[in-house]
Amino acid sequence: MDADGWTPDYLPAGRRARHITPLPGGFANPVWLCELDDGQRVVVKASTDAAPGMFASEAAGLEVLAECGGLATPRVLALGPNSIVLEALDPRLPDTEAFWEEAGRAAARLHSTTAHDRFGWESDGWLGLLPQRNEWDDDGHRFFAEKRVLRYLGEPLVEAALDAADRAGIERICARLPELVPDTGACLTHGDMWRNNVIADGTGRPAFLDPAVSYVWAEVDVAHMLCSGGVPEAFFAAYAEVRPLHPEWRKHAGILNLRQLLAMLAAAVPIPTIVSSIRELIGAYA
């Protein structure tokens, strides 16, 4: 194994890499751009410490977003117990208003055409390195409270960072969700939709990476795009042209972002303001 963690075992049997380049991002698992022995360029995401089924879950999520949701995603070329090999797309983001408008329309079409009668997914998945609980539920507020927020309170790093008053405040927000956030019904969501998970395909169209799919409120994806930062207003304006947003969607986004803040805290994402942001939400909505 090389110093950067690469091993030829991450590629399918009989394939060899003649050049590998570590890619940025890859917080959950290392990622490489590989030029294979026949000149083909692929992206390999891999780890010898990967939990069983993690990469299979990612592959299934990419495929369902493409087949059912109409999103452009990288094609899955190979899948192993410790790796996933993907079509290499264009790492240079065309950071233009037209690009982000098309990304907004694509997300809105996903949410407009994939309604479901329950919240959840056919199996549990992953958000980064942590399990995503997806047991089916008929109640969207209960599902979001239990499977997207409260499930993180038992994570060791969350327990260490938040005190009893913080935990009680989060529980009060969850109890108030029916009055704070409208139940807009379940639809297929990407689940980890933020700026770094949007790149360009071979034609320059927006392509979406690293899903954590489930059927939940569409505003969960929109909230993540807004609160993670760096996404131009063109995205949200174009989204609303296809799928109108609730008049108070920006307020809801802050509340729904509690899930992402807790997930980042649990995963030791090095953002020093996470705990203060959680406490601001508690002060505003608990």
Image (spheres, helix red, strand yellow):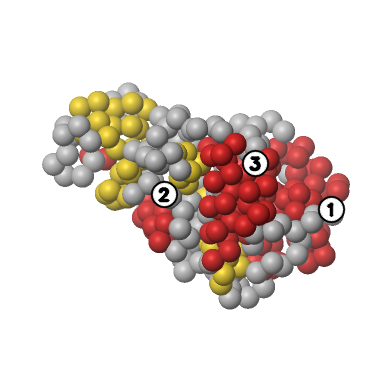
Asked whether, in this view, residue 133 is left or right of residue 8, the answer is: right
Q: Amino acid at mark 3?
A: Ala
Asked whether, in this view, residue 2 is left or right of residue 50, the answer is: left
Mark 2: few/some/many CA within 10 Å (<14, 14-19, 20+): many
Disc 2 versus disc 3: distance between alpha carbons? 21 Å
Mark earlier in primary sequence (1, 3): 3
Q: Amino acid at mark 1?
A: Tyr
For residue 36, the mark is: none
Mark earlier in primary sequence (2, 1): 2
Viewer-nearest of discs 2 and 3: 3
- Residue 208 in view in this figure: yes
- Residue 57 in view in this figure: no
Badge 1 is on which residue? 285
Viewer-nearest of discs 2 and 1: 2
Q: Amino acid at mark 2?
A: Thr
Mark 3: few/some/many CA within 10 Å (<14, 14-19, 20+): some
Q: Which residue appears at 37% of the width and 40% of the height? A: 202
Q: In which quadrant of the rendered view does residue 45 lie?
A: top left
Q: In which quadrant of the rendered view does residue 111 lie?
A: bottom right
Residue placed most toward the observer, 115 or 30: 115
Residue 188 in percent (x, y) is at 54, 63
Asked whether, in this view, residue 119 is left or right of residue 74, the answer is: right
Mark earlier in primary sequence (2, 3): 2
| Quarter in which the C terminus is drawn | bottom right
Q: Which residue appears at 47% of the width and 69% of the height? A: 122
Badge 3 is on which residue? 234
| Quarter in which the N terminus is drawn | top left
The secondary structure type at the circle numbered 1 is helix
The secondary structure type at the circle numbered 3 is helix
Badge 2 is on which residue? 73
